[in-house]
Amino acid sequence: EIDWIEAERNYVRLHVRGRSHLLRENLSRMAAALDPARFCRIHRSTIVNIDRIHAVESLFRGEYLVVLHDDTKLT
């Protein structure tokens, strides 16, 4: 049910169905525990659920904008 995950110092914030939950966990350990077939690390501080991706748009200098099903935009 996780849409995406972001790092916040020594915590991770899980974004789930329009709500967020803060966990005391390291993003690297969280990434290692997730199924790599379902989750992708798109930035050093962001992991996204591949099933929640609506579109990927090319920006500039090799950067991309990932748009989720709920219109959340992540780079």
Image (cartoon, rainbow, N blue to C red):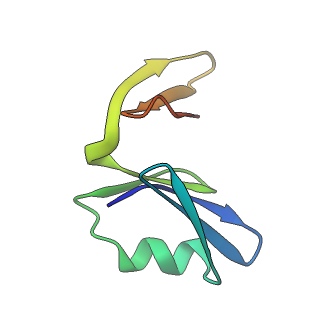
**Rendered image quadrant of residue 23:** bottom right
Q: Please state the horizontal and vertical placement of residue 34, each as a whole percent of the image.
A: 34, 72
| Quarter in which the N terminus is drawn | bottom left
Q: What residue is at 49 percent from the left and 49 percent from the top?
A: 18
Left or right of 33 on screen, residue 73: right
What's the residue at 36%, 33% (across, down)?
Answer: 69
The C terminus lies in quadrant: top right
Direction from residue 9 to residue 43 in the image, left or right = left
Which residue is at 53% across, 56% downward? 19
How far across and how far down the image is residue 54, in percent? 33, 29
Q: Residue furthest right?
A: 9
Q: Nearer the viewer, residue 64 or 22?
A: 22
Q: Quadrant of residue 28?
A: bottom right
Give the residue displayed 48% in from the left and 76% down from the top.
30
Examine the rendered structure and indicate whether residue 18 appears above or below residue 10: above
Q: In front here: 40 or 20?
A: 20
Left or right, 41 with reference to 25:
left
| x and y percentages locating residue 47 in the rendered image | 48, 56
Tell which residue pokes out farthest to the left in this image.
37
Q: Residue 7 location in percent, x, y? A: 66, 63
Q: Measured along the vertical axis of the image, is residue 68 above or below residue 64?
A: below
Q: Is 36 located above or below residue 34 in the figure?
A: above
